[in-house]
Amino acid sequence: KKRVYMKNFLIIILIVSLFACSKNENKNESNKLQSESLEKISIGNEKVSLAYKFSKGDKFKYSLTTKSQNEEIVVADSTMKSKADQTLKYLFDCEVIDIDEDKIAEISLVVSSINFDIDINGQKIHFDSNQKISEEDKQKFMEYIVLHNTPFRARINKHGEVIEITRVEKMIDKMNSLSQQKQNLTTEQKSALAKQLAESAIRPITQMLFRELPHQEVAKDSSWEKRFPQPLGTMTMENIAKFTVVDFVKVNGNKTAKISNQNMEIICLRKRNPEIL
């Protein structure tokens, strides 16, 4: 009898950048917020409440970059090692469509660009959604093709929590049109698939854009963390994001907290003991 052990360790680093845009958006203004000098303000030991301040009609862009490293070791008759490094970049165009009486914003989001580079044991793969894509690659990278340039909506509360993802049906239509085995989906089937896609894929990536703010008051150097358990096949992952208020500044006349985000770690441990006769 032989036993096979598999250990999987995955680290993801998230980089989120905000590009502020006016209603008359143009490319020259897209990096205004990053380049302007932020005026520091002092509040002493005073504690404050943090909240997103959405306004109907606001337009802005988010650039999301994830860097991940995956190492896997399988021990049987011999030891096999596998290593994968990935850099994945998204560009989101966002617009605040409406705000209800509970201060929950309905935001339209479009992923206007996706590109990534993967190195698996020295074998390199590159993908750019804005380049011409072959029919073979459309099948290989279907999940990214479906997401690219297909608008959806998210309801976000003042604490940055994603309450709901809606209008995902167009992604289901796009997925079905790309599939080699197209299906005649009923309205109920499409709705069920859209809900599944929204919860399993769209909500997690949208939540990466909006930092979940604490409900309690904070001061400079206050820290908090968010944990997001997520199943992945036979593994259980726990995403851990840590945040710290490093300063308070003024942006366009508004008091704003400057928050640092330490590495988001996703740690998964998988152990299998199959008996081989």
Image (tube, rainbow, N blue to C red):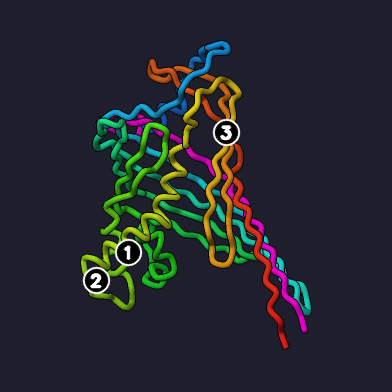
**Residue at left offset 53%, top offset 48%:** 228
Query: Residue 261: percent from the left, percent from the top?
Result: 56, 35
Q: Is residue 275 above or below residue 90?
A: below
Which amino acid does the dot numbered 1 rest on?
Answer: Leu
Which amino acid does the dot numbered 2 rest on?
Answer: Leu
Q: Are marks 2 and 1 in contact (CB under 8 Å)?
A: yes
- The answer to whether 202 appears left or right of 226 in the picture is left
Circle 3 SS class: strand
Query: Residue 240: percent from the left, percent from the top?
Result: 58, 45
Q: Which residue is mark 2?
A: 185
Circle 1 SS class: helix
**Residue at left offset 33%, top offset 44%:** 154
Q: Which residue is mark 3?
A: 224
Q: Is residue 27 magenta?
A: yes
Q: Which residue is mark 1?
A: 193
First in sequence, mark 2 or 3: give its number: 2
First in sequence, mark 2 or 1: give its number: 2
Q: What residue span does the magenta drawing correspond to?
A: 1-29
Q: Nearer the viewer, mark 2 or mark 3?
A: 3
Callout 3 crowding tier (Cα within 10 Å): few <14, some 14–19, many ≥20? some
